[in-house]
Amino acid sequence: MNGTDERLLEEIAELLADPAHRDHPLHAALSQLLARHREQSRRLDRLIGIADGFQHTAQQDLHATRHELERQLHRQRKLSRIADRYQLLLSERNEALRNESHHDPLTGLANRRLLHEHLERLIGTSERYQRPFTLAMLDIDHFKRINDRFGHDVGDRALTQLADTLQSTLRTSDHCGRWGGEEFLVILPETTLEQAEPLMSRLCNRMRHLDIRQDGVRIRITASVGVAQHRPPEDYERTLQRADEALLQAKRQGRNRWLAAG
Ligand SMILES: Nc1nc2c(ncn2[C@@H]2O[C@H](COP(=O)(O)OP(=O)(O)OP(=O)(O)O)[C@@H](O)[C@H]2O)c(=O)[nH]1
């Protein structure tokens, strides 16, 4: 109720209270109307009070709920950040484990397991698209003598330098790895024996020029290599075997050379 209404009601109440109007014919009806109006106003005020109370409580509830939601959201974000970090750590660890299980710890080259995986893939594509590939088995000559004369550490250094030379001589699409001991396998996809020949000469040449020194003495290293082109429908194990036979032949013929499998 606004101020004008209040004043009007007060005026009516004053008029009704005035003895001069007590006998007026509308006096009783106006008195009742005024009393009823006041009663209704009181009820309305009470209802508004209750509604305000409800609204206040509802607002407090809303505020508390929002606060709780924000708290949970914050917790969830934190948890998800932790989970992301954990996931990243896990995948890095998995990657490191995979790397360790596929690489030779001394030279960092692919180990025999990874070489087999490359060969499995290669034989698949080579059969499907009838593409050639060539394998070369390389073995350091008289490596035992190097170990015996200069020590195992020098032998290890020779193996790592040879591995580096292999990697820098090959194309990125080729693969090489440590087959075992002082034996290395070179995989040349999309390559015929004829195309592999210049590379074999270059490899043998680079082995001869490895600069490995001990107490000022240069240690001369040579390698023998057996090379075989895959002959469909043979499996890659057979190609490996032929490369190995050629390697033995190269050793028998005096080492420090490469020989193609017959
Ligand atoms: N330093 C070092 N030596 C190794 C490693 N793996 C194998 N060898 C050595 O490599 C030598 C291989 O000797 P052999 O199989 O007799 O062959 P070789 O002396 O190279 O003789 P040919 O192959 O016939 O020319 C052994 O003395 C092994 O101990 C290695 O990781 N580090």
Image: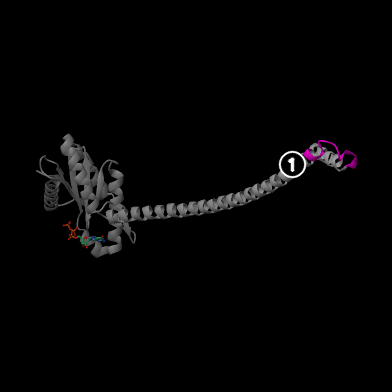
Measuring 82% from the left and 36% from the top, which residue is drawn there? 25
Q: Is residue 21 magenta?
A: yes
Quarter containing the C terminus: top left
Q: Position of residue 254 (x, y in %)?
A: 14, 52
In the visual, does 190 lie left or right of 154? Answer: left
Q: Which residue is mark 1?
A: 37
- Residue 228 in view: yes
Task: Give the class, few, some or many, for how many residues have Cα within 10 Å of label 1's Cα (few <14, many ≥20).
Answer: few
In the depicted view, which residue is nearer to us: 246 or 25?
25
In the visual, does 173 lie left or right of 248? Answer: right
Q: Position of residue 150 (x, y in %)?
A: 28, 63
- Ligand 1 shown in quarter: bottom left
Measuring 31% from the left and 45% from the top, which residue is drawn there? 168
In the depicted view, which residue is nearer to us: 152 or 107?
107
Quarter containing the N terminus: top right
Task: Indicate the amino acid at tag 1.
Answer: His
Measuring 64% from the left and 47% from the top, which residue is drawn there? 51
In the image, residue 100 sits, relative to residue 22, either above or below, namely below
In the image, residue 161 sits, relative to residue 14, either above or below, namely below
In the depicted view, which residue is nearer to us: 39 or 140?
39
Total marks placed: 1
Secondary structure, mark 1, is helix
- Residue 218 in view: no
Q: For the magenta stretch, what is the residue range?
A: 18-29
Colouring scheme, one of rainbow, by chain, secondary structure, one colour? one colour
Q: Position of residue 222 (x, y in %)?
A: 22, 52
In the visual, does 152 lie left or right of 80? Answer: left
